[in-house]
Amino acid sequence: MDRVEQGWVGIDAGKGHHHVVLIDGNGRPLLSRRVINDELELAALIDVIRDRVTNLTWAIDLADGAGALMIALLLHRAQPVFYLPGMAVNRASAGYRGEGKTDARDAAIIADQARMRRDLRQLRLLDDAIVRLRLLTAYRADLAADRTRSINRLRGLLVGIFPALERVLDFTNQGPLILIGGFQTPTAIRRLGQARLARWLEKRRVRGAARLAAAAAEAAGRQTVEISGEAAAASVIARLAQTILELDRQLAVIDREAAAIFHTQADAAIITSLTGIGDVLGAQFLAAIGGSLAGFASADHLAGYAGLAPMPRDSGYRTGNLHRPQRYNRQLQRVFYTSAMISIQRSAASKAFYDGKRDQGKRHTQAVIALARRRVNVLWAMLRDHEPYQERLQTPALAA
């Protein structure tokens, strides 16, 4: 069989198997094969395709997970691999003949899109530390979501049996969780009494034990009626409180591990010099960008990836319609938005910028997003120049 000079390979990745399609420069299929997601099987297919084509371009619809083994095999063989998201494949399929959907068809579309497009993101081998940061930050996001769900569930149950106590407790702190893990009903708190409750909390090293005990005792004094199902709800509330405390412990462990890895990176000190970014947000930032800015041509590119660059939706005489993009990295946006919120409280320059946007009539969220967008430029310049952040305040001109 004659060797082909140029070829494009589309991979429709799956958990148990992948479907691989090879096309030539005219879009004609040269190979279509279903292969098990196993190293020996994948390596054999890669070698077969490399024997048939001199210059290959590979594209896949999964950048991790089930596609990780295939990507690793290709990158270790110095093959160029590009990422085409599954949503983009589904949208592109409308431009091809037929309405059917099969793995072979999807793989062929991926290959053809890789042949025509020049804007696909190229995948690269990541440093082991960055891979670890990605795993830790992803797991941390799951734990944080579990914690939020558990707190919402706890509040829903507590307001059903003891609304006065639910109003005065802040479950973002551990003290109220320790309290509610031991005593969930007005009767139990009244029976114990404020003084004994304060001592009970002090033994468990709760900050502000006396103040918390006083608030709980006052709430208990406002309710004497026992709600139907109170005992069952109290049992579930106690379990939820223990679950949340355990999630807090796991989050603290992950934060320490992520911070230790983050500080091994060359740019860690530069990143954390920007007001509002600490070890956790810095680790999430590096995990989101793949460890460096090599994949981003400009600060605008980075802002677009973070969803902070509005996209126009103009048509005819309707112009100036800007909307948030639908495809962006949520984790990276959260890093910039959260750090912008923190910087408003701790940085005079950020506070002045935020106040200026508010004076222009912007809503709170709009002003924070505008500040986050500006901070993308600042962080980009810091990493480009390898210089830490130095806040510069503009002094008003003296009145004549």
Image (cartoon, grey):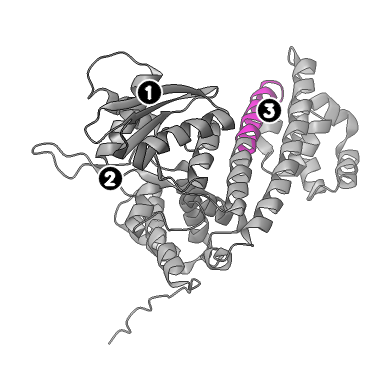
Separation of marks 3 and 1 at Cα, in angstroms: 53 Å
Residue type at numbered disc 1: Ser
Q: Which circle marks residue 32 in the picture? A: 1
Foreground disc of the pair 1, 2: 1
Q: Is residue 217 visible?
A: no
Question: Residue at image x 64%, y 32%?
Answer: 146
Location of residue 30 in the rendering, given as x and y in whole percent from the top left corner:
32, 27
Q: Residue farthest to the bottom?
A: 400
First in sequence: mark 1 or mark 2? 1
Say what amino acid the circle numbered 2 marks.
Arg
Q: Mark 2 points at which residue?
A: 118
**Mark 3 and mark 1 residues within 8 Å of each other at the beta carbon:** no
Other-residue count near label 1 (Cα within 10 Å), few / some / many at <14 / 14–19 / ≥20: some
* Residue 229 picture location, percent across and down: 75, 13
Name the residue nearer the viewer: 8 or 164.
8
Relative to 32, does residue 219 appear above or below in the rendering?
A: below
The structure residue drawn at horizontal position 55% and vertical position 33%, both measured from the top left corner, is 65
Please state the total of marks drawn on the protein image. 3
Query: Considering the numbered disc 3 on the image, is that residue within a helix, a strand or a loop?
Result: helix
Verify CB contact (< 8 Å) between mark 3 and mark 2.
Answer: no
Q: In this view, does 242 lie to the left or right of 295?
A: right
Pair 3/2: label in front? 2
Is residue 155 on the magenta stretch?
A: yes
Q: Is residue 185 magenta?
A: no
Q: Earlier in the sequence, mark 3 or mark 1?
A: 1
The C terminus lies in quadrant: bottom left
- Circle 3 sits on which residue? 154
Please give the range of residues in magenta.
143-162
